Image (tube, rainbow, N blue to C red):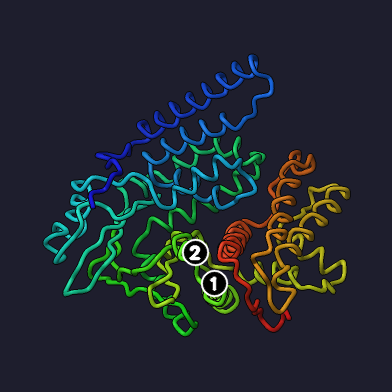
Amino acid sequence: MESKVKEQQSIPTSKVQRAAKFISTGAKVGGNYVKHYAKKVVNPSMTKEELHNNNANDIYNSLSELKGSALKVAQMMSMDKNILPRAYQDKFTMAQYSAPPLSYPLVVKTFQKYFGKTPESIFDTFTKSAVNAASIGQVHQATQNGKKLAVKIQYPGVADSVSSDLKLVRPFALRLLNMNEKELDHYMEEVEEKLLEETDYTLEVKRSKEISKACSHIKDLNFPDYYEEFSAERVITMDWIDGKHIKEWLETNPSQEDKNRIGQALWDFYHHQVHNLMQVHADPHPGNFIIQNDGKLGIIDFGCVKVIPEDFYKGYFSLIKRELLINEDELNEIFYGLEFISDKDTPEEKIYFKGVFKEMISLLGKPFHVETFDFANNEYFEQIFKLGDRISNDKMFRKSRQARGSRHGLYINRTYFGVYNLLNQLEANIVTTKPEWLE
């Protein structure tokens, strides 16, 4: 079947070209605001929905052409469902599956650079069109000695433009994420570090092999094999995993038993990584999971892995305990350690922020407080969204002179919310295992 998606012949790679793209997008977004307010004069009851839709379209289309970090940040925003108007969520979720792919000559150029050969002279067959294209790279299907392979190729210029792109994304992020500048800088530093790691495909192959081996004993999970001889700094070759993404699989009306089984495999996978390996696949968006025809859950992307420092781990999970039987001094120590409060805070701020973070972590910890948890419970997710809304609109947060929370918490929170979200889509009821010390 011929791909209907228009291929891209080039990517703006220089700072000047990329900045120009952002500036023109900013101008479009500005124009959308002007149009919105002009229409509102005529029709005062008009909502911002059309404005959000137009902005989401313009921003997404530009980021799609730029690829890389900018598109990845959009993808991350779509996972944080409670911080964006719905139009942005819906559009940015597409960043997970459907960025326009690169034309074939650019793919050949990458192969020539790293292997000194074309894809056709390496593999028995190689699809000229990408079978899917995401934020940092695109995937082609190949065969070798009767084996079906997935070959992921990174877009040119992505690795070199991470830092400058994130600077360009800042004004959009400030407006869309409702954050103060200090908080955003804190956030962006961690995001930049992770994105630079994600562009290092040699590191990804190493981590993929390590983590998949360490998790190979977990029931109902499957991992592809990776082929180092066909991989390089910007190319990864691994087994092709046949099956359906979660959304497609759910459309086949699987039984509750099967949904619970897949959900349990997902929970067990994350449990083992967080509590035993102390490093975690920190990108739990739906595009990274495939339900295979034999009913196993295939894990296909280890680009984003967060190594969890021990002191952060201890503090974070001791707050998740059901009975917070910690005396005030110990509690203060944990809050300082996790950077929820600092010496710059007034007594009033300390009381407020301790209260908010206790509430947030105990809400996040709810599944840990029971033997089994039904993630189909939408009421639980409503509570999370409401708390997120309340916090992001709270004056104390808005006028806070510093970022709140350890930078390590960004990817850990994102991981848990992402996993909970997938379990909610699966409507899975699962046994929420936890380490003994958390029982």
The answer to whether 227 appears left or right of 19 in the picture is left
Q: Residues within 10 Å of mark 2 (few under 14, many from 20)?
A: some
In x, y percent, where is residue 197?
Answer: 43, 58
Q: Are marks 1 and 2 in contact (CB under 8 Å)?
A: yes
In x, y percent, where is residue 120?
Answer: 13, 60
- The residue pinned by badge 2 equals 250
Quarter of image, res 337? bottom right
- Residue at 62% x, 75% y: name it: 430
Examine the rendered structure and indicate whether residue 265 appears above or below residue 149. below
The answer to whether 67 appears left or right of 304 in the picture is left
Quarter of image, res 256? bottom right
Which residue is more in the foreground, 26 or 342? 26
Q: Residues within 10 Å of mark 1 (few under 14, many from 20)?
A: many
Secondary structure of the residue carrying numbered label 1: helix
The answer to whether 354 appears left or right of 200 in the picture is right
- Residue at 18% x, 71% y: name it: 144
Which residue is more in the foreground, 62 or 289? 289
Residue at the left extreme, as displayed: 121
Quarter of image, res 397? top right
Between the C-alphas of marks 1 and 2, the distance is 9 Å
Q: Give the amino acid at mark 2.
A: Leu
Secondary structure of the residue carrying numbered label 2: helix
In x, y percent, where is residue 200?
Answer: 37, 59
- Residue at 36% x, 47% y: name it: 158
Dot 1 or dot 2: first in sequence order is 2
Which residue is more in the foreground, 343 or 143? 143
Q: How many badges with numbers are in the image? A: 2
- The residue pinned by badge 1 equals 259
